[in-house]
Amino acid sequence: MLRSFRAIAAASAALLLATACNSASNSSGSSGDPGKGATVRGVTDDSIKVGGIVSMTTASGYSKKDTDLGAKARYDRANAEGGINGRKIDYIGAEDDGQDPGKNLAAARKLVQQEKVFAVSPMSSVTFSGADFLEQQKVPTFGWGTIPQFCSNPHIYGFNGCLVPMPGGTITQSWPEGLAHVLGGAKGKSVAILANDNDAGKFGIRTYQQGFAAAGFKVAYAKASVPATSTPNDWSAYTKEILRSNGGKAPDAVVSVMQTPYNIGLFTALKRSGFKGLLTDPTDYDPGLLAKKTTAQALDGVHVLLSFEPFESDSAQMQQFKEDIKKAAGKDVPLNMHMLTGYMSADFFLAIAEKAGKDLTVESFQKAASTYSDTGTMVGDRALPKGQKEAFGCGALVQLKNGKYEVSSPFKCYEPIPFK
Amino acid sequence: MADLLGFVLSGLVSGALYALLATGLVLSYSASGLFNFAHGATAYLCALGFYELHSGFGWPAIPTALLLVFVIAPGLGWALDRLMFRKLARVGETAQIVATIGLLVALPALGLWVVELLEEAGASVKPAENQFGLPGVGPSPAESWQLMDGVGIDSDQLITWVATAVVAVGLWILMRHTPLGLRLRASVDNRSLVELRGISADRLSSLAWMLSSGLAGLAGVLATPLLGLSSHDFTLFLFVSATAAVLGRFMSIPLAFAGGLGLGVLQNLVAGYASFADDITGFRTAVPFLILFAGLLILTRRQRTAGTAAVDAPPIDYLAGKSWAHKWGPWAVAAVLLALAFYTVTTPFWSGILAQGLAISLVFISFTVVTGLGAMVSLAQATFVTGAAMVAGLLMSHGWPFIGAALVGTCVAAVLGALVALPALRLGGRSLALATLALAFLADQVLFQMGWLRNGDTGWEIPRPVFGPVDLTDDRAMGVAMVVLVVAAVAAVSALRDSPSGRAMLAVRSAPAAAMASGVSVVRTKLMLFTLSAGLAGFGGVMYASYQTRITATDFTAMTGLIWLAVVVAAGVRRPQFAVVAGLVFAVMPPLMSDYVTESAHLPVILFGLAGLALANDPDGYAAAASVRRHRRKAAASSPAPDGGARPADPAPTATDAALQLRGVRAGYDGAPVLTGVDLAVRPGEILALLGPNGAGKSTTCKVAAGLLSAQGGTVYVAGHDATRHGAVRRARAGVVLAPEGRGIFPSLTIEENLALHLPDKAAREAVYARFPRLAERRKVTAGSLSGGEQQMLALAPLLQDPPKVLIADEPSLGLAPRVVDEVFQLLTELRDAGTALLLVEEKAAEILGVADTVAYLSQGKVTWCGPRSEVQADRLTEAYLGIAGAKGSEGPDSEGPDSEGAGSEGPGPEGAGSEEQEAGSAGVNGAVPRPAQPGDAPTPTAADTGDADNGTDTSTGTGTDPSAPSTEVARP
């Protein structure tokens, strides 16, 4: 055994030595500098290669796969309009990361090292372990900024800003202000906020408690107490507490910071126990939910927060969006927010690439991005670098009424408050 | 008060689902002895099926539900039983646990894949994602009624209650009042005894699996409106209901059922009144797992087997005696080639993938330590990985150097491992696995929710280290460094295995009691294994995190740990190299699949899951499968008389009048021959006493004769017909009954039920009671509470009513008081008088000589003397007992190889008694005086006149029961 150990030790030493020499001679040149030489990764004279990362298949049954369709729709239109500065977008589709951190990183590596894309857009998942790699490889990346990595990396952009409030940053007020609009003012109105019993839920409670209070509401109840791993099938424990939280009476509004299955259960239980106040949540804007009687009934009357222009709006760009989606899908498909996520991620990338001009490199792209701003898009007024620190701060509320969504508080941008 | 009532009522809804799932778990556990981790996946599949058929194809709800619950789900259970569980029942517990974990992953992916394929084919299926508030069997949306203020129920809840109540009543009737239920309960009690009674346990197992799957299907259909289509939720639901199964100790269906209901209520009450724990993030989420963990600790206290797999046959060491180069050469070459590849052939992408695979290999090697060396299934490895990486990240954010942070992280993981191990150590097998799983969930939901450790969703950055000129930010350098680390880890684990402490570990693994007796501290050894393994996993975690340069609390969840285990064990958990193979396959296969086979993300998942299926055939994993098979073939080929070709060349006609005859029977347990050519014949109305020292092969002879163990050579005749290839069930049906060592009764059935299994006719049972008033008095008492003598009476009494053709009794007097022994022998004599041929194995030679007609001495796997009782001489007896007769001059147990695989697939694996014999058998005494065996002379005929006038109900086949003059025929050794 001793002999074998010695042999292994000797072999290891030799290997390490070789590694040392090699990495010493390589590390300077190989650390993925895309601007090296005359070629730019993924950019040719007439095309720009772009890929995406999207959670499509997951064990939890939650999928964002229409993000891919949304992005494709936007790129198709760009190409139909002649491309960006003469270059067509070569969108190779989105990799499925299955909400698995390992696969997320592998997908990022594949796009950069194997497919050699210029940019990743859209990236929409609940995990973003590929962020550090993409940043290190200087890959412009656009996606849904619900993950902190969208708030700290120079090459990574959220399509509607960075949605994770950072201490010292700001909190967007579109939800409290929109709700105040619906209720005819916040003064004297009380809200109960409920979230999942985990770190994220606690964080949500912390931010919204501050946001609603700042908007003038009385926060009667704010707890992160709903088990996070699977939906409770009995809500009476929570509804009872909520219904007595406002000094023994029910609060004026119940704010749920949870996912759809939770909201369905909570709202159904609240209604059954006679709650007549306002219900609101940030996730249930999905026309697919209207197709089923149970969900349509459970969510009837609920005000849903969106951070983009509602599909019900009749603006020109919304018309354009619907047309593009229809063309890309080849048929009429029910719209959902994932399509918009993909669409607007692509849109943001295209807008900056356009600004970067004919000489497209990562450097020129970053330079164009650093001063980018526009107004009146479907996600409101976009501005960088502000958008890498805070959300664009725009939002609308829609109410589900009789099987249809109706705008209850129109799409508008609000002044954020400092996050303490 | 209304609150409380409300909590209880609505708690009963989830309670009902828990009860259904727990009942299914208990049923399947009792059928095959394995805890079905995939039970929730079955429920999920049915929910998915219900949704697609009902909402997608527009089939009506109730017929669809009935179709699923009564046809499709049982069909799935049946298929899985045939394909997998039946075989798994015979391999080690680790393989069982892992195979069902594999299914847990594979089944939902399979369902989704089918939906995907159907969609591509243009069928009107609906997408299975993002589905909430699905319609159930009842009206959609559900009707709801307000019972009183704050207490309401809806139609879905009502349907769940009613369906569950119907199932409860139905199950109760089935189990308590039908012959089928009686058999099922008997097979729960003692599977092999059921086979000995001529009831096919395999068929019962199929039935139990069908029932179990049907219950899962029902739970799935009922839970559709509650859980939606999330396989993850279904699996979590199952883990919670495992608590109820634990309550029922995996044995009692009523207890499990009640436990499930209670669990739902308890969970609701805790959720309602847990405001004291508001400050602990994740406490409410963790409640079910707290209950599971506490339940395991409290309820499994009785067995103190300290975490061993029940019987885990050691693997074949196909490399034993090979040179170092032979053992390690190919691996060393592979490692060097891999290291070279990083700088020559692999593209940056593949370099990264390989480095990732190697990093995960380090984690996987930790399974080799805890599961391979220690035979303990740990489902908490992901916790150690996350814990170590988080701590390392936390320290690095405070400016610690990489090495220091990695070391502290590793130590923290080791401490976590010790903490997990301490309470878990006294649990065994599946309880240990479940306890570690519960702790892993607790860590996910409470420990890793702590803000200071978790740092939100950002996690901690773990930059790759740079040591002087070695800069690991380059993937290739990282890869080579990982090769070196992995080689070191493999070498270290191999060295540990071969070291004295490694041998202690292996000793603890195979026989904790024996290890303890030899001065090895079982607890310390197991604790050390767990700690080492956790530390290794932690170190691997830090390296993996540094590969991805960041760790967040959600990177490796408890569920990840489940998948890892399935991947590692599928490759092979006995040697660290196999873990490396597993790691590389785990990293390399998905991109390869997506490049060359299909874009579908489901297929790799299905394949990883189904790798567990292969464990049913190759319990030591695919990496070793080829070598093991080759080795077995070689061993079989080198064995002196290969299987099948060993029929005795003796042209002498078989003794057609013998009720049972063994000719040249050779048998043994994997790798160790016990019987080396046994010749015996018992005639109707004759008692043949088989004597011999400990380890001579007496019990093995009994097993071969009864068909529990198949012979590797030679022939077994039952009533003159070749029955060598018949299993226990067919033998029993042919009238060959074995009363096994110990008591041949079902301890948890009542006396009445024990009798009913053998004597379905009530009149016959009454006759037994008339003959044994002591049994009659206590007919409703469970047999386990009888005294030893009464139990033996109970085992033999029904035979008197319906005398079998052949009774093989293995030490019927064991542990009985002398007075009771006389009674037992009296019974046996009665049986002989009724025409039964008796083969009695005894150690108490003095008593048995009083009843035996013929006596045979068994020594070192051979019959060395056989003759009438009258010729038995005291010195011959002594020699037989000392194991010296015939030792010289006969070959004795030689280097006969183990059986090739496939044979022996009917009977259960080697059991404790057998292995004891193996060891004792090889310790025979040499140099004894040869004592040639003599052909038996006909002894005086015994009275066999009572004939079979009063037992015409005999249903067994075979040649008549004419009690011709008993004689003994023994071939010369």
Image: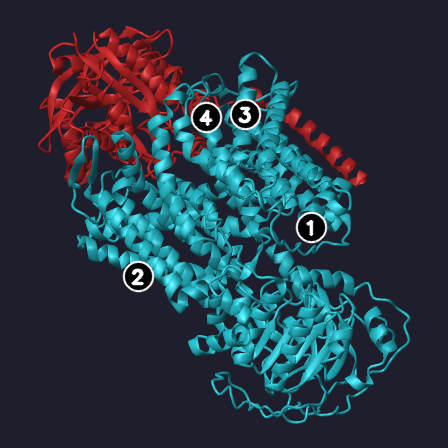
Chain colours: A red, B cyan
Sooner in the amino-acid sequence: mark 3 or mark 2: 2
Disc 4 residue type? Val
Disc 1 residue type? Ala
Residue that label 4 marks: B446
Asked whether, in this view, residue A336 is left or right of residue B626, the answer is left
Mark 3 nearby-residue class (10 Å; few <14, some 14–19, many ≥20) = many
Q: Chain of mark 4?
A: B
Do labels 2 and 1 touch, CB within 8 Å?
A: no
Sooner in the amino-acid sequence: mark 1 or mark 4: 4
Which residue is at the front of the view, B741 or A195? B741
Let me know if marks 1 and 4 both belong to one chain: yes
Label annotation for residue B389? 3
**Distance Cα–Cα, label 2 vs label 4:** 42 Å
Residue B141 screen position, x and y as percent: 16, 41
Image quadrant where residue B13 sits: top left
Sooner in the amino-acid sequence: mark 4 or mark 3: 3
Asked whether, in this view, residue B883 is left or right of residue B275, the answer is right
Residue that label 1 marks: B511
